[in-house]
Amino acid sequence: MSILRVLTWPLLLALGLCCAKAQTLHFGDTFPAVNGKSLSGGVLAIPDGHPAVVILGFTQAAGKDASQWTARLERDFPTLAVDDLIFLDSAPGLMRGMIASGIRRGMAPARQAHSIVLDHDGSLWKQRLSGGFPGVDLSHAVAVALDATGHIRAVGCGAVTDGNYAAFRAALEKLP
């Protein structure tokens, strides 16, 4: 076997691993497409060609934060879509179904249509969010504002406070 053939496979493997690494997201980047079955049983596609806020949660604590963000956003922007991506891949496999059922039971039917529970890619999304947005704490909910073209325009994190919500709201008010 030639030396070239021996070295080709390790090089291809290394290249594949480099390419598989998550691209860190930044302001102005296009939000990666997510399609999935909503908690109401329908199909939800994010982004969908309209301004929206996507709330990502990776922990149980993020659920409370997400509820606060959703309530405030629905009050202030009643026509804006607020979608949830709930990641359960860090929960034990046998518990995920029960956790998803509990989330569904604790959520109004209108919210269920805007929520996807995912049991994979949580670490990929954490990588995407962790480097590009200073101050983002992934143990809490992360709210991402998207314009109609799916570009990221604002990011909020944690429990809703007057300070972090004011900056987020100002960015939303600038969206067409």
Image (cartoon, helix red, strand yellow):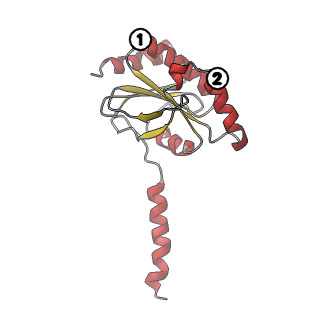
- Identity, as a three-letter code, of the amino acid under mark 2: Arg
Q: Would you identify the image quadrant in which residue 118 lies?
A: top right
Tell me if mark 1 has few (under 14), some (14-19) or many (20+) residues whose alpha carbon lies within 10 angstroms of its own.
few
Q: Is residue 16 above or below residue 32?
A: below
The residue indicated by pointer 1 is 76
Q: CA distance from mark 2 to mark 1?
A: 25 Å
- Identity, as a three-letter code, of the amino acid under mark 1: Asp
Tell me if mark 2 has few (under 14), some (14-19) or many (20+) residues whose alpha carbon lies within 10 angstroms of its own.
few
Q: Residue at x 56, y 42 (%)?
A: 122
Query: Could you say where residue 158 lies in the image, as x and y percent from the top left?
Result: 55, 24
Q: Is residue 45 above or below residue 24?
A: above
Instruction: Kindly state the secondary structure of the residue where label 1 is placed.
Output: helix
Most foreground residue, 65 or 24? 65
Q: Is residue 149 above or below residue 7?
A: above
The residue indicated by pointer 2 is 105
Residue extending farthest to the bottom is 1
Query: Could you say where residue 46 lies in the image, as x and y percent from the top left?
Result: 41, 35
Left or right of 25 in this view: 113 = right
- Which of marks 1 and 2 precedes in the sequence? 1
